[in-house]
């Protein structure tokens, strides 16, 4: 009868010794500096959301901005009496002068001729050369622009 050796579990040689209890307890206390974002794993698992209950895309009609600008031929460089399309009041337009193209052309021309000591800036001070914007005095709506060029 063979002598049955008792089952003895021996640690295989060559492995490093097991850490002590204190080392094993201390290891999990290392704080994780950057936890992975929770959504990252979810997005990797589901690259494409299922198109089961997705409603069809709503195509909104293009919004057309209606500018209530009255026909510009009737507006000159003087205030005119007109019915404002925004507030429906009959008003006399309020004018604002702004430098358009004409003052720049005259400034450049004067500079070329030789008026280089500030005289070329005279067109910017002359309202008769500027563009005229007509506003409604009630609702401040732009009613039209009179351009010199
Ligand atoms: Zn108005």
Image (tube, rainbow, N blue to C red):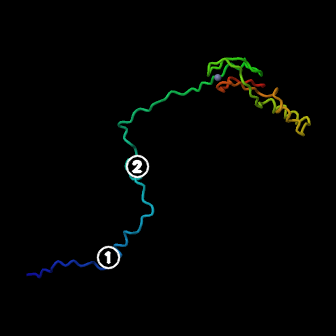
| 10 Å crowding of disc 2: few (<14), some (14-19), many (20+) | few
Is 97 above or below relative to 39?
above
The residue closer to the viewer here, 133 or 45, is: 133
Quadrant of the rendered structure where residue 34 is? bottom left
119 w.r.t. 79: above or below: below
Considering depth in this image, is 3 or 105 the residue closer to the camera? 105
Residue highlighted by disc 2:
43
Q: Is 31 located above or below residue 43 in the figure?
A: below
Task: Residue 95 in the image: state x and y as whole percent.
Answer: 74, 25
Q: Residue at x 36, y 75 (%)?
A: 23
Residue 109 image point, x, y percent: 87, 33
Q: Closer to the camera, 114 or 133? A: 133
Q: Is residue 18 above or below residue 112?
A: below
* Image side of residue 34 versus residue 120, left or right: left
Q: Residue at x 78, y 30 (%)?
A: 101
- Farthest left residue in view: 1
Relative to 70, 17 lies left or right = left
Q: Quadrant of the N terminus?
A: bottom left
Quarter residue 57 falls in: top left
Question: Mark 1 against mark 2, which lies toward the viewer?
Answer: 1
Judged left or right of residue 20, residue 123 is right
SS class, disc 2: helix
Label 1: which residue? Answer: 21
Query: Residue 144: x and y, percent?
Result: 69, 23
Q: How many marks?
A: 2
Q: Which image quarter: residue 97?
A: top right
Q: Is residue 66 left or right of residue 27?
A: right
């Amino acid at each position: 009868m063979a002598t049955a050796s008792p089952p003895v579990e021996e640690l295989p040689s060559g492995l490093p010794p097991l850490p002590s209890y204190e080392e094993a307890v201390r290891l999990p206390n290392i704080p994780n500096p950057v936890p992975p974002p929770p959504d990252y794993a979810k997005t990797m698992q589901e690259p494409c959301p299922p198109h089961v209950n997705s409603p069809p895309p709503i195509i909104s009609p293009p919004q057309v901005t209606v500018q209530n600008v009255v026909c510009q031929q009737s507006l000159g460089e003087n205030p005119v009496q007109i019915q404002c399309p925004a507030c429906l009041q009959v008003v006399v337009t309020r004018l604002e002068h702004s430098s358009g193209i004409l003052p720049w052309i005259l400034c450049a021309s004067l500079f070329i001729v030789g008026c280089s000591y500030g005289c070329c800036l005279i067109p910017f001070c002359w309202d008769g050369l500027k563009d005229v914007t007509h506003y409604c005095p009630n609702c401040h709506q732009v009613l039209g622009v009179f351009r010199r060029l």
